Amino acid sequence: MAQSDDSSVSGAESFSGFWQEMAGSAADAARAGQQISSEMLGQMRQTFVESLRKYMDEYVRSGQFSQMMQNVLTQAVTFRGQMTDFLTSAMKTSILPEVDPERVGDVVRKVEQRVADRFDELAERIGKLEARPKPAGKGSKKSKVKAKAARPAKSKPAAKKSKKRGR
């Protein structure tokens, strides 16, 4: 573990060295009244990426990271086992009987067949209804309008009310 501490220190030193170099270069350029050139920015970016890559590589290869990943994976496997045990016991203790997939498939097929048969019966009944001749004058809008126009006009009840008020 002492070796991983040494490697992480060297990674951290290269990372902090990059920032010190960048800050010093930027301060020198500012004092001189110059702008930072694109070459210098490219070099700073390259140094940053390289030092970050080295630091991450050292960390991923360290014993600390390895131990952490081992713990995470062990906990994940343990959790999965606990969930499997819980769900299995819940299924066994539930009110539902054990389900045979073939039996479920048979039931679904029978229900589908019954629904299809019923649709066929309904389609046949609708066809017979549509084939019947419609009675003349019943049910059409035009006949209702004509019947309404032929009714005699009713007397208005407002006239009776006015007589009652006069008393």
Image: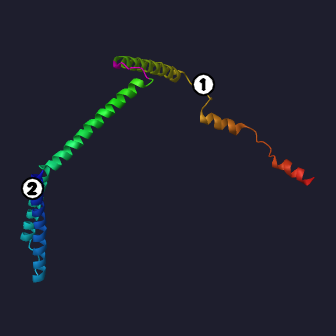
- Residue 6, image x, y percentages: 9, 56
Residue lying at 45% horizontally and 22% vertically, measured from the top left: 119
Under mark 2, the amino acid is Ser
Residue lying at 61% horizontally and 36% vertically, measured from the top left: 142
Q: Quadrant of residue 153?
A: top right
Q: Which mark is residue 99?
A: none
Q: Which residue is mark 1?
A: 135
User: At numbered mark 1, what does the secondary structure look like: helix, strand or loop?
Assistant: loop
The magenta span reads 96-101
Q: Earlier in the sequence, mark 1 or mark 2?
A: 2
Of all residues, the one furthest to the front in this rendering is 2
How crowded pointer 2 is (Cα within 10 Å; few <14, some 14-19, many 20+) is rated as some
Residue lying at 12% horizontally and 57% vertically, measured from the top left: 8
Asked if the residue under mark 2 is in contact with the one under mark 1, i.e. CB atoms within 8 Å, the reply is no
- Residue 104, image x, y percentages: 38, 20
Q: How many marks?
A: 2
Residue lying at 9% horizontally and 70% vertically, measured from the top left: 21
Under mark 1, the amino acid is Pro
Residue 105 lies in the magenta-colored region:
no
Q: Is residue 4 or residue 30 the one in the foreground?
A: 4
